Image (cartoon, grey):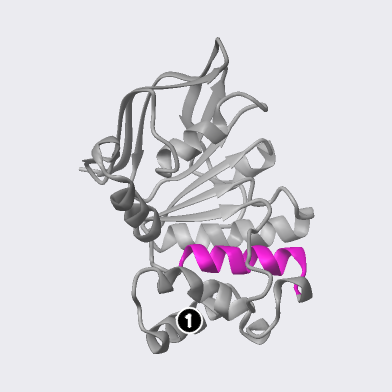
Amino acid sequence: MEKNIIELRDVSKIYKMGETEINALSEVNLKIQKGDFLAIVGPSGSGKSTMMNLVGALDLSSKGSIFLDGQNIEELSESDLAQIRGKKIGFVFQTFNLVPTLNAIENIALPMIFHGIKKEERMKRAEEILKEVGLTNRRNHLPKELSGGERQRIAVGRALANDPDVILADEPTGNLDTKTGFEIMKIFTELNKKGKTIILVTHNLDLVNYVQKVLKISDGRIVENKKVIQHKIK
């Protein structure tokens, strides 16, 4: 029996702007299985980013329950949520979010500091990740000395630092050209083959060719949830 690593049950998210309430998500039910490669798609304002924030424990729902590995994250303290975000979920952002004063290997090693991993072990793990993302020769370069694609590779490496089960990527190819975006998607595909659950949030429908499942959101509701055939990167 396949295991659900993430489950949303009747989840709604309401934002208040003065006297106005905005329903960003409305009664969403979703099961994401361990090892899924999923794209969440939809137009701007559809609720994609809200869903990612909830799935990634960056925000809490207004109604409903969210489970990660069978645990209701809505019942956890902020410190426990921080631990989950650090250990079970890796984040990749469109704007890379690298620390400009740290070089490539230091950026990758950074998340491990917050979990008390000793320096020798941090650097050994970071070296292994650098090799995995194909940037061993750029280990001592600052972000400003790297191309956009290289910076995103380092960002992916940082997301892998604590060996999380889930990678959440918010528009990971949004600032990259087509060829470089292809290279990033190839990395995600290889990570998925190794057992990582990958969730992409994107408005780029071309990325659907790389994933296994597509979730389409409109006006805060799931309007389509289907499996797809991968046409690229075997």
Residue visible at 67% across and 28% down in the picture = 44
Q: Residue at x 49, y 39 (%)?
A: 52
* The C terminus, quarter of image: bottom right
Q: Is residue 198 magenta?
A: no
Residue 69: tell me if it is visible. Answer: yes
* Left or right of residue 26, residue 145 in this image: right
Depth check: 139 or 185 in front? Answer: 139
Q: Residue at x 57, y 15 (%)?
A: 18
**Residue kind at label 1, given as amino acid type:** Glu
The magenta span reads 146-160
Task: Name the residue nearer the viewer: 35 or 96.
Answer: 96
Give the answer, above or below, for where 83 lies relative to 219. Answer: below
User: Of all residues shown, which one is farthest toward the front?
Assistant: 18
Verify whether residue 153 appears in magenta: yes
> Count the marks: how many?
1
Q: Please, what secondary structure does the residue beneath circle 1 have?
A: helix
Q: Residue furthest toward the bottom?
A: 120
Instruction: Write the residue at 29% across / 35% down.
Output: 74
Q: Which one is in front, 108 or 229?
A: 108
Q: Residue 68: image x %, image y %?
A: 29, 43
Within-10-Å neighbours for mark 1: few <14, some 14–19, many 20+? some
The image shows residue 127, relative to residue 16, as above or below, that is below
Q: Is residue 43 above or below residue 131?
A: above
Q: Nearer the viewer, residue 231 or 87?
A: 87
Q: What residue did someone put label 1 on?
A: 128
